[in-house]
Image: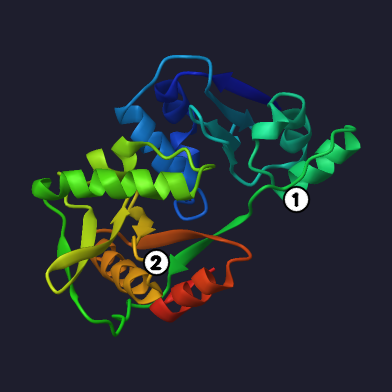
Amino acid sequence: MAWATTDDIEKFTARAGEFLASRPVEHSPLLTEADHLGRHPEAGTDQAYGWWVDDAGQVSGAFLRAPRHPTFLTPLPEAAVDALVAMLPLDAVTTVDAMLSAAEQAGVQLVPRHRVVIHRLATPPRPEPATGRSRLAVAGDRALLDQWFDELMAAHPGDASDRAYVVGDPLPEQRIVLWEVDRTPAGMAGWSRPVHAMTRVSAVYAPSGDPRVEAAVLAAATAAADHVASDVVVLAGKDDQTAVSRLAALGYRA
């Protein structure tokens, strides 16, 4: 049993891709990141990708640390967790309970920074009762979307999302929805390129902070994503009860 590592995203997907595809919902963060990085590879040492090979010679775990991002982990066998503690810069790891326990046993103190839960659309999305209408963003919306991206990143300084991932790639592929009130854009949401029939809705933003607009544009993006993928998922903070309740109302289940 051993970890194999690389800083080449193509080598990682060639070796670990089949394992990641075996559970597209559970492995959503790694799949969507790997898909984006495969189309926008970067040179440099600020990245690492690895896969755990078990006694049977099968890949049974993986991690992905994209440039400027924390590390994403799949669920891991206990032996893989213990070995990973000695390998990765732990201050950058997106922690799970197993990592916390293994780190403690190794004499390393970790403090969870942020916990997220994957929510999967379980029933057809129900439209939100809100004033306005949705439409797909077009090329002429680019300046506004760039402005909103900057505002969104400023509001979440710990988020290392790439502009290409949020705006540049999805815009020409019609993967961004705008919510308009009185024909004026009031909110946006997008979804990732479908990978193994899974897509993830993200970048939900309303500059006014109006929860009704946020809920409406999330519902619109969910409905659009549901037409192109079998599994539609959203990541939400574990303790963000407002977001969890909103997702539950739309038909998502943790």
Q: In this image, 119 relative to 173: left or right?
A: right
The residue depicted at 9 percent of the width and 48 percent of the height is 140
The residue to which callout 1 is attached is 97
- Residues 203 and 183: in front is 183
Q: CA distance from mark 1 to mark 2?
A: 33 Å
Say whether residue 57 is visible: no
Residue 42 x %, y %: 39, 20
Q: Quadrant of residue 121?
A: bottom left
Q: Secondary structure at mark 1?
A: helix
For disc 1, the neighbor class at 10 Å (few under 14, some 14 to 19, many from 20) is: few
Give the residue displayed 46% in from the left and 55% down from the top.
25
Label number found at residue 209: 2
Residue 113: give x, y in percent of width and height. 67, 47
How many C-alpha atoms fall within 10 Å of the one at disc 2: few (<14), some, or many (≥20)? few
Quarter the C terminus occupies: bottom right
The reply, left or right, for residue 6 in relation to residue 77 is: left
